[in-house]
Image (cartoon, grey):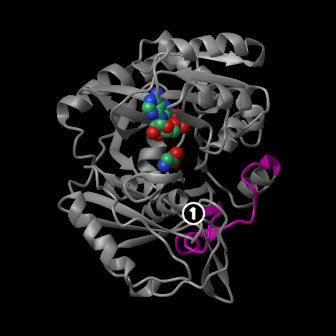
Amino acid sequence: MNILILGSGGRESALAWKLAQSKKVEKVFVAPGNAGTMNYGTNLKINPNDFSEVKNAVLTSKVQMVVVGPEDPLVNGIHDFFLEDDELKSIPVIGPQSEAALLEGSKEFAKEFMKRHDIPTARYQSFTEDKLHEAYQFLEYLTPPYVLKADGLAGGKGVLILNDLEEAKKELKEMLSHHKFGEASAKVVIEDFLDGIEMSSFVLTDGENYVILPNAKDYKRIGEGDQGLNTGGMGAVSPVPFANAEFLEKVESRIIKPTVEGLKKDGIPYVGFIFIGLIKVNGEPYVIEYNVRMGDPETEVVIPRIKSDLADLLTAVADKKLDQFNLETDERSAATVMLVSGGYPASYERGKLISGLDQVKDSIVFHAGTDLKDDQVISNGGRVLSVTSFGKDFKEALKQSYQSIEKIDFDQMNFRKDIGFDL
Ligand code: AMP
Ligand code: GLY
């Protein structure tokens, strides 16, 4: 089988790495990929959001399955595009159609879905500009901190948490009236602040059945101790030590099952990954958000812990036979540490020569933002490399990643030295 993975980050590197190990897979294509994905297959210089380019590539390269990494092609309807095209409709796409992608593409849609299906989440109301006055009243009724969420996709920046009522009102007005996050904040969800510890569950569903993949916890802030600006993710561990069997049972019965059942009841087809951002409050799980894809860098710890053949697993999804699939996972822990460009997540320079990659023997280095220049690997993004290791627990895995990182260098390389600090 030939498989095309759409995307170019660490997540897509981990998917390509795993699929390249499958005997069922003849060729792996990654579009557009990076300098690391070339080690597992062929990079195609196409834009995942240009569906006619994707179609050409699929037909030319005889692709038999498409795995969508990031959310935007899904929200833009790539799966729908395949289903509506006579030449493409028999080729399975792993990733939901645009209606289900609203679980990530619209916070209001996700909140309404959870309310309808009794899935635990923070209480909320949503407002548009013409209801600014009511929105202020709702803020006055709540207690701080105040959580404001742009309804639409805002590149991970659309959530504000504010302690001061006046500041919350000011930011709300910025979002609704002055388009702080463009179209994405034309509607704002205001919700209760939940105080707890976060983690993520990953589910693969064929629309009827589901399998639960290894769970993970990521570290989003740039600075140690979870300080500073939000990033795409600076590191992750799997499994999450505080997620014991009792807690995970609650997650499955109160959240995962009702989510898959709810999609069915609503008549919304779903084929693909569901990434559920959870928070544990007084021992109980609540949903913070849904994403309709895998997480990055969570994929860099989740995928290495899957022992089963990933092509078999994804084929079972496409064939709606997940109920017959027995997922095998690695008992060991995995941890990943992201090496980022100096200045990220604000402005940073690209094009830095990366040294030492071939010295790393005891970790897997997934490329996130890299390119090749004169056959040398250079940085080409904020998040550059994700260094994953195994261990008997997350501490041992992290120790190995930090040892491997000592061998790697590029100008202004930065990383968090405290991944897992709160566990
Ligand atoms: P989201 O984009 O919805 O994941 O929100 C980004 C981050 O904001 C989450 O990872 C949480 O750390 C935080 N957050 C979102 N909603 C809440 C909430 N209701 N209570 C506390 N923290 C929240
Ligand atoms: N690491 C968080 C995300 O992928 O959204």
Verify whether residue 412 appears in magenta: no
Q: Name the foreground residue: 363 vs 309.
A: 363
User: Residue at the spot x=25%, y=26% of the render?
Assistant: 282
Q: Residue at x 47, y 61 (%)?
A: 14
Q: Is residue 76 left or right of residue 325?
A: right
Which x, y percent locates residue 278?
A: 39, 33
Is residue 340 or residue 254 the one in the foreground?
340
On screen, residue 388 versus residue 377, left or right, reads left
Tell me if mark 1 has few (under 14), some (14-19) or many (20+) residues whose alpha carbon lies within 10 angstroms of its own: many
Answer with left or right where residue 101 lies relative to residue 215: right
- Give the image quarter of residue 344: bottom right
| Quadrant (top left, top right, bottom left, bottom right) of the N terminus | bottom right
Mark 1 = which residue?
Answer: 28
Which three-letter amino acid code belongs to the residue tagged 1? Val
Can you give x and y, in whole percent of width and height, for residue 264 in the image? Answer: 50, 17
| Numbered disc 1: secondary structure | strand
> Which of the 4 image quarters holds residue 213?
top left
Residue 4, given in percent of the width and then of the height, sits at 62, 56
| Between 246 and 97, the one nearer to me in the picture | 246
Magenta-drawn segment? 29-52
Against 250, residue 32 (above or below) is: below
